[in-house]
């Protein structure tokens, strides 16, 4: 995510240097790009967390099944 934001600001600086009359519009696009990059990062972290929790729950369920069948 940090690399993507760095690339956005790098492009913003180069674009403003070439055409300073579009600075406000380009800054708005850069902020939108940063927000979308951070949103994607949060979604990926959230998805990874859900996968991790799902793996833990499945492993616990399988271990419980092994323990409960060993008593019968």
Image: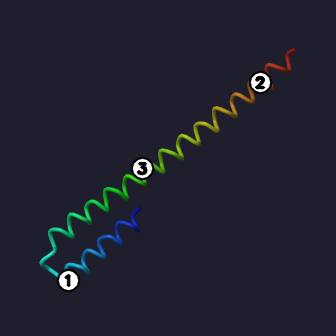
Q: Is 45 on the left-hand or right-hand side of 31?
A: right
User: Which residue sits at x=77%, y=24%?
Assistant: 65
Which residue sits at x=85%, y=16%?
A: 71
Q: Residues within 10 Å of mark 2 (few under 14, many from 20)?
A: few
Residue at image mark 2: 65
Q: Residue at x 51, y 45 (%)?
A: 47
- What residue does disc 3 label? 42
Of residues 2 and 13, the one drawn nearer to the viewer in this rendering: 13
Q: Is residue 70 above or below residue 26?
A: above
Instruction: Please tell me in which quadrant of the rendered image residue 15 appears.
Output: bottom left
Checking the image for residue 17, the label placed there is 1
Residue closest to the far bottom: 18
Looking at marks 3 and 1 on the same chain, the residue that comes earlier in the sequence is marked by 1
Assign the N terminus to one quadrant of the image: bottom left
Q: CA distance from mark 3 to mark 2?
A: 34 Å
Q: CA distance from mark 3 to mark 1?
A: 32 Å
Q: In front of the other: label 2 or label 1? A: 1
Which residue lies at the image location 31% right of the left edge and 62% below the top edge?
33
Question: In the rendered view, does 44 fall on the left or right side of 63?
Answer: left
């Amino acid at each position: 995510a940090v690399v993507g934001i760095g690339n956005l600001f790098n492009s913003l600086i180069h674009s403003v240097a070439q055409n300073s009359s579009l600075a406000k519009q380009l800054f708005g696009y850069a902020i939108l790009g940063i927000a979308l990059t951070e949103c994607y990062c949060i979604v990926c972290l959230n998805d990874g967390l859900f996968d991790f929790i799902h793996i833990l729950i499945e492993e616990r369920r399988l271990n419980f099944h092994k323990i409960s069948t060993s008593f019968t």
